[in-house]
Amino acid sequence: MSADLDIMIFRSISELVKYLDDKISEIERKLEDISKMLESVKDRKSKYERIKKLVEEISGEASATLSTTIYISGLRVIIDPKPVDEYEVLESVYKALSDKLNVLKRIRDVVDTYLGKYLNEEGINIIVEFRADVPIKIMLKM
């Protein structure tokens, strides 16, 4: 069972292309926001790592990490995250969204170039199956 599956029906190729364009714009805005957040955390992360290295050198052993993580019904909650933790989360989300953006752009180009060239008319229902907001199957219904 995949909970991230969805289906949508479009009345024309141009409607599907507009939907994809909107999703692409939304992801580009998110990436811009995350990029700014990464920059603001980067300096704190670097300072934290230098301090941690200093403490390890002075103490002669790897410092014990104080866990500020609790688990609630399978959800990991980090209280007052270290800059390193925050940076890793932001970086992994940034990479995942970048990959998703590239896939959506390729799909948009295929839809617009090939399907739009031959099927840009009303009266054709386009049924699209999505996984995590990315089209994985397009059915053309006459």
Image: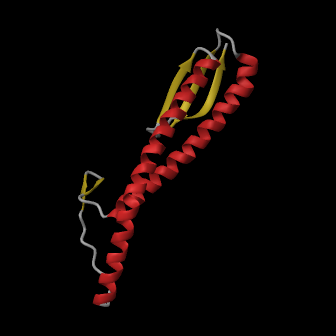
Give residue 117's quadrant in the image: top right
Of residues 140 and 89, the one drawn nearer to the viewer in this rendering? 89
| Relative height, residue 141 to residue 42 (above, below) | above
Of residues 92 and 136, the one drawn nearer to the viewer in this rendering? 92
Residue 96 rendering spot, x and y as whole percentages:
51, 49
| Relative height, residue 75 to residue 30 (above, below) | below
Residue 48 rendering spot, x and y as whole percentages:
33, 70
Residue 109 rendering spot, x and y as whole percentages:
68, 32
Number of marks present in the image shown: 0
Q: Report whether residue 104 is seen.
A: yes
Q: Report whether residue 84 is seen.
A: no
Give residue 142's quadrant in the image: top right
Residue 5 rendering spot, x and y as whole percentages:
49, 35
Residue at 46% in and 50% down: 35
Of residues 72 and 60, the one drawn nearer to the viewer in this rendering? 60
Residue at 37% in and 58% down: 41
